[in-house]
Image (tube, coloured by chain):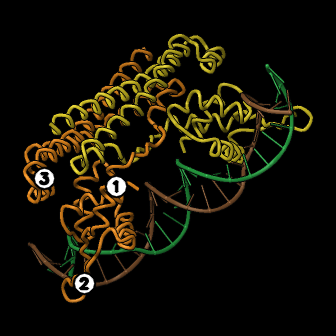
Chain colours: A orange, B yellow, C brown, D green
Amino acid sequence: MSLRYALLAILRVGPLSGYDLQKQFHQSVGHVWHAPDSQIYPELRKMEQAGLIEGEEQARGERGTRRIYHVTDAGEQAFAEWMAAPLDYQRVRDPAHLRAAYLEATTPEAARAFLERHIEVWRGELAQWEGELTHIEHLSNPMLVRRLEVLPDDDRERTIEFKRFAYEGLVERARIEIAWAERGLALVDRLDA
Amino acid sequence: MSLRYALLAILRVGPLSGYDLQKQFHQSVGHVWHAPDSQIYPELRKMEQAGLIEGEEQARGERGTRRIYHVTDAGEQAFAEWMAAPLDYQRVRDPAHLRAAYLEATTPEAARAFLERHIEVWRGELAQWEGELTHIEHLSNPMLVRRLEVLPDDDRERTIEFKRFAYEGLVERARIEIAWAERGLALVDRLDA
DNA sequence: ATTTACATGTAACATGTTACATGATTAC
DNA sequence: GTAATCATGTAACATGTTACATGTAAAT
């Protein structure tokens, strides 16, 4: 159900069309909670049915239309309730560490390929999250700036600090994944010698 | 599909009944890849249909029966192929960091409750993984010992080292989650003052 | 006798993935 | 005129979650 609240979090900044929302999503919250377009559009419809958001059809050109969504009071309340409710933690399900525990069952080459890919994947995530961190610190994220504009002074620091906090956590996580896989490569080399 | 290979990894050590397998699972790989019994038993049936394992019905008492599974050649091959194939990484979907990024939208009390729960959850995982690490290092994990017994000398060190490597990674991960949430608590205190 | 452990699932639901599908509008 | 980007999905499938369901055997 987190997708719903990730979308609400973006719409709370201001009304957006599904398309614009989806773009903002991929550039911001999408780095923490991925979802494809094919999940976003239907979810918006469901949220509208649930009364959390309202969409207004807008003409675009001669025949085209688009739907501009905004958060309702019920939506604001639902978001607040979600923020205050305990998060439900999923049980661990970690394919990379599962495989790492059985690397003796394959060749050193396959083990290296696996670890190198791990490094590559997490470097990608790291780059995304470091980029976001920079945007937060330099106030160069347009969504964040729009949000700050409508916020009382007191809330601005809080808003920035919590975003920084979240992304710092992600950056650290990516770094230890990379460091871990690099140690793994060294281990493969040692055992292969 | 990782569940299938997690189960194969255990069965490769030696034949087991579904029930014993499930118990071993929860005490070992289950710490890395959780699955409830209601997923394990049907998956074993599917694996049998796919020819990866074979089960033999065994009498137990007067009326009871149980099914003892062992890995087939096809199963060994499938495991080897999975180990050599690229892992498919799931896109990020991290509810805790998602919420952390919007903590300004709730009360300091709710923020603290969230972070304290985060610490509690990860302390639980940490304890599991540290326990496993100890068992690996002291060779006090029965599954590992049984595995080592049937392995040539050369493979023993590798087997132990890779398990240690995997669990060390998990332990580190848990530690940074805890440290991160503790920093979050300090941040909430600072902003609340 | 009663509890604990053995033994094995089904059913309904929620969530997420992948591939496919379609058309309009704007900028060059 | 053609490419990019705007705009919005459906359908089939895989995976995982939760709650429920049932009975046997061994230990105290």
> Badge 1: how crowded within 10 Å, few (<14), some, or many (20+)?
few
Q: Which mark is drawn over residue A81?
A: 1
Nearer to us in this view, D3 or A36: A36
Q: Secondary structure at mark 1?
A: helix
- Residue name at image x 53 percent, y 19 percent: B159
Vertical comparison of B129 with B137: above or below: below
Pointer 1 indicates a residue of which chain? A
Q: Position of residue B37 (x, y in %)?
A: 64, 41
Residue type highlighted by circle 3: Asn
Q: Position of residue A127 (x, y in %)?
A: 22, 41
Vertical comparison of A106 with B98: above or below: above
Residue A191 found in image quarter: top left
Vertical comparison of B70 with B154: above or below: below
Which of the marked residues, 2 or 3, is nearer the chain's N terminus? Answer: 2
Is A159 left, or right, of A38 in this rendering? left
2 vs 3, front mark: 3
Q: Position of residue B42 (x, y in %)?
A: 68, 47
Q: Secondary structure at mark 2?
A: strand
Q: Which mark is drawn over residue A141?
A: 3
> Where is mark 2, residue-wise?
A64
Vertical comparison of B17 with A47: above or below: above
- Residue name at image x 51 percent, y 21 percent: B132
Nearer to us in this view, A113 or C4: C4
**Circle 1/circle 2 CB separation < 8 Å:** no
Which of the marked residues, 3 or 1, is nearer the chain's N terminus? Answer: 1
Q: Secondary structure at mark 3?
A: loop
Q: CA distance from mark 2 to mark 3?
A: 30 Å
- Residue name at image x 45 percent, y 31 percent: A97
